[in-house]
Amino acid sequence: MSRKKGHEQEPMQIPEPENERIEVETNPEEQPEDRASQLEKELAELKDKYLRNMAEFDNYRRRSNQEKADWIKLATQKLALEVCDVLDNFERALAQVGEEHKDDKLIKGFAMIEQQLRTVLEKENIRKIDAQGKEFDPQWHEALAHIPSEYDENVVAAVIQNGYMIHDKVLRPARVAVSSGNPNAGNDNQDIEQE
């Protein structure tokens, strides 16, 4: 092997480590009691920092575990909404069956499938919001109309679309028609006033 002039590489030199000594500054006039109290103060500060860091880490771990648990609980939310729509359609279809067809095998099969779907959802802590005849609550209900009915004012008179809960959280609010009061009740009061 021949080396060309001008392209020779010098061997790499690694610097020797210097033996450095770390010296603690000490004041010859400082008393040992003063030095001890200063060290105790530093120790207390470091212990406080350590405890704060441990508490922050513990809070982070707890919050992280809670977020993961919430994410797992709500991971099926989109699928659950679609299954709830299917369940609603089964319920609507079965409500249209006449009394003369209730004993048909096909209708009984559909009713069993509807019940099985409801059971599967309940196992996953998904349940229907019971709204009919209840006081209107915007947390659970979405009002689409005000209608006169036999119910008192501000009571759910009709359910337009079922609402569902998942783990104590509203998955979909119930879409409802809210009663504006009994129209005949006002006429009775007018008749009494006219007499």
Image (cartoon, rainbow, N blue to C red):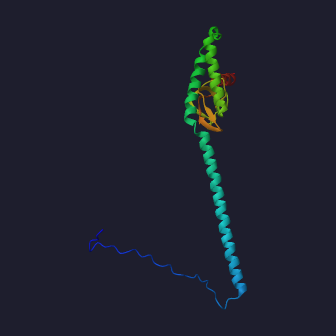
Residue at x-position 57% and y-position 36%: 77
In the image, farthest residue toward the bottom: 29
Find residue 163 and report its horizontal and vertical position in percent: 60, 31
Q: Say if residue 162 shows up in the picture.
A: yes
Q: Say if residue 145 shows up in the picture.
A: no
Q: Is residue 70 above or below residue 189?
A: below
Viewer-nearest residue: 15 or 30: 15
Q: Quadrant of the N terminus?
A: bottom left
Q: How many numbered circles are shown?
A: 0
Find residue 95 and report its horizontal and vertical position in percent: 61, 17
Q: Is residue 130 above or below residue 61?
A: above
Viewer-nearest residue: 142 or 76: 76
In the image, farthest residue toward the top: 100
In the image, farthest residue toward the right: 33
Q: Is residue 107 above or below residue 136?
A: above
Examine the image and state in which quarter residue 117 appears: top right
Q: Is residue 28 above or below residue 56?
A: below
Examine the image and state in which quarter residue 69 appears: top right
Viewer-nearest residue: 137 or 165: 165
Residue at x-position 57% and y-position 39%: 75
Viewer-nearest residue: 38 or 178: 38
Find residue 50 and report its horizontal and vertical position in percent: 66, 66
Q: Quadrant of the C terminus?
A: top right
Find residue 119 and report its horizontal and vertical position in percent: 66, 27
Residue at x-position 44% and y-position 75%: 14
In the image, farthest residue toward the front: 1
